[in-house]
Image (spheres, rainbow, N blue to C red):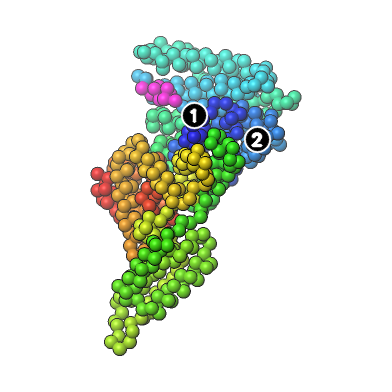
Amino acid sequence: MANPFLRRATEFIRDDATFLEIVSPAPLTAFLTHHPRKADLFELPIRILGAPGSGKTMLAMLAEFRLVEAILRDLTSETNKDLAQALAGAGFLENGKPCVAAVRVPMESEYRDFWELPYDDAIKTKLALWLIQARTMLALLRGLTNGGHRKLEDIRFIARDASEAQLEQIGGLTAAGIRDRALQVQRAIYSIGASLLPPKIEDLPRDATDPYQPFECIQEIEIDWMGERLLVKPIAMLDDVHSLHPDQFEQMFSALARREIKFGRWLMMRLDALSPSAVFRSAKSISTHNLKPDRDFIDVFMQGGESRSKERKRFREMAADMADRYLPRVQAFRNRSVTQFRRLVPDEPPRLTEAKLRELAAQVDRDQRRLEVTPARRVSIEATISAYLAGAQSGDREPEVGLAMTRILMARYANRVSSQQASMFEEFDPDPKTPLKADSSVAEGARLHLNDYSGRALHYGFDTICDASNENAELFLQLAGALVARMETQAIRGRKLALPAPVQHEVLRNKALEVIDGWAFPFARYVRAIVDHIGRECREVSITPNARLGSGANAIGVLETDIGQLLASSDELSLVLKYAVAYGAIEVTRDYGQGGKSWCLIELSGIVCLAHGLTLRRGGFLERDLDYLRKIGG
C-alpha cells in the first residue's frame, strides 16, 4: 500500500470501518468541546473556517449520523470508545445516545453554476438554496436508515411552532412525504442547471418555483433508537461553501442566518472566501449583511483561534494521535512493533565531530583576539553561559552550543563597550552598562549560527514537525510522510527506523521546498517572491555576530495604521496578503506593541522557516513598510 501519510484519508478511504480506525477525535475536542459558545453551536449558523488541509471535511464526516451510529453500536473497540467520548464532549451525544442528526452536503461547483443563469439574483439564490435543502433532506433520510437499523415509518419530523402554512410545501411531516417532495424539487431544479440552454423564467417547472423551505419548518426528528423513541436535532453541514460565487455566498448566508430557523446550519469554508479585512481579523469587517458575529452567527477558526502556546500544545497532541493511527497502515512497519511516531523522530541533538569542534574553538579564540576581549572577561562570559546551560530545560546543551553562545556574547560585549574610552595605563576591561545575559534566545541564536557555520542540523524532533505545520493537519502529514518514506528505505535495508537529527533536517527542508514550489493558489508567484525575499533577509539578520534579535527573525512588522489603510483600499496587495494567509504562506498578528508603536506582524509560516533555516520561535521581526512588500513582490 502507498504511504498513507501522503494522501488525504477523506480521499482514499471509502470504507467507514477503516475511516474510523484512523480518524482522530482530537479536532472535535479542540474546536468544539472547549469552544466558549459551545451551547449555541447547534442553534446559530456556524462558519467553520480554516486553510486547506486543516481538517474541516474530516470533522464533518466524523460528525455524520451514520458514523455516529456505527460508533455507538460497537463500543467494544477502544478506538470507538475514544470517538464516542469526544462526540459526547462536543455535544453530539447525551447520556450515551445521539441528540444530533448531522449530514454532510458537499458544495460542488454545480451550485455555483446556478449563479451564471440569466435570472435575477434572488431567483438564482433560491434555486440553489432549495436544491441544497432538498439534497440535505434526502441525505439525512439515507443516514437515518443506513444499515437497516430503522425504516422510513420509524422516522417522524417535528415542526417548529407557527410553521403550519409551510408543511404542505415540504411534503408534510412523514419521512415518506418529505422524501418524495425532496426528490421532486431536486429533479426539477437539477434539470434547469443541467440544461444546454436555460429555460425562460416563465417556463421553469412548478416544482422548482413553488416555495420549499424545510430548514424553516423542521425543528426536531423523532427516531427509533434501540427500541425507544428518541428526539434528535437536524444539522446540515455544508462542506466547501467557498466554491460558491462570493455574491451568491453572501445572499445564501443571509438567508440561512434567519433567526426563526431551528435546523442547524454549519458552513465549512476556506479563509480565502472572506474579504482581506476578515482574513486579517479586523472586527468590523467580519460582519456581513448587517449580521454580526457572536450575535447572529458564530465563527470557529481551525487555526489561530486561541493563544499561541495553547494552540501549539493542542496541535501536538492531535498530531501525535493522528500519526500513531496511521503508523499501522505502513506496510514496512508492520513487523517492527512500531506504535509511536514520536519515537521515530527523536529530538536528540546532533553533535559536531571532534575536528569541527576544535575548528570552532579556534574560531572563538580568534574572535576573542579580534574583539580585544580580555581572558578574565571571557572567563566571566563562559561562567554565565555554563550557569544557564546547567539549568536549561532544552536538551541541546552540547559543547558547540556553549562555544557559539560565547561568540555571541563576546560580540555583544564589544558592541556595548565600544563607546567607552580605553585607559593608557590599565587593561581595558570595563563592565558594560547593560549586563550580559545568557538565556534561551541566545542559545537559539547559537544554534542558528552553528547551522550557518558548520551545517549542524537545526530542525528535528516531533515538536518541531508539529510547530512547522502551523496547526494544519494535512501539512503535518505531508512532513511526517516524507520522513516515513525515508524510514521505509531504512526498513528495507534492515536498518533502524529512527532518524537522526541531520537526516530529519535534510528531509524536512527538502519537503518544505517542494511544498512551496507546488503552491498554485491565486497570486502564488507573487506570494512566493515575497516570502523568499523576507526569508533571506531574516536569515541574514539572524546570523549576525551578536545575534541582535536573539532567537532570530521570521517576520516583518508593518505599522498597524498602514495595514488598516491598505485593507480599507482596493489595492491588489491586500488580495495578495489575503491568499498568503488563507493558504498558509504567512500568519498575521495584529496590534503587536513594541518600541512604543503598534505593529502588524507578517510572520513566515513554519514551512517557509524550514526552507530558509529560520527559527520557529515567534517575536523576532524586521521593521518594514508597504512599499517594501510591493517592491519585493513585483
Task: Tell me where the magenta segment starts and ends, as one range.
Answer: 108-116
How packed is label 1: few (under 14 Cα within 10 Å), some, or many (20 or more)? few
Look at 51% across and 53% down and name the residue there.
347
Look at 39% across and 62% down and name the residue there.
355
Residue 114 within the segment the image draws in magenta? yes
Q: CA distance from mark 2 to mark 1?
A: 21 Å
User: Farthest residue toward the right?
Assistant: 227
Circle 2 residue: 80
Does residue 177 lie above or below 78 as drawn? above
On the image, the x and y values in percent for residue 561 come to: 34, 53
Q: Earlier in the sequence, mark 2 or mark 1?
A: 1
Task: Kindly indicate the quadrant of the structure image that contains residue 621.
Answer: bottom left
- Name which residue type carries label 1: Glu
Q: Which is nearer the eye, 203 or 184?
A: 184
- Name which residue type carries label 2: Asn
Q: Dot 1 lies on which element?
A: helix
Let me know if residue 56 appears in the view. no
Circle 1 residue: 11
Q: Which is nearer the eye, 146 or 387?
A: 387
On the image, the x and y values in percent for residue 511 come to: 40, 42
Look at 58% across and 24% down and name the residue there.
140
Does residue 68 lie above or below 433 as drawn? above
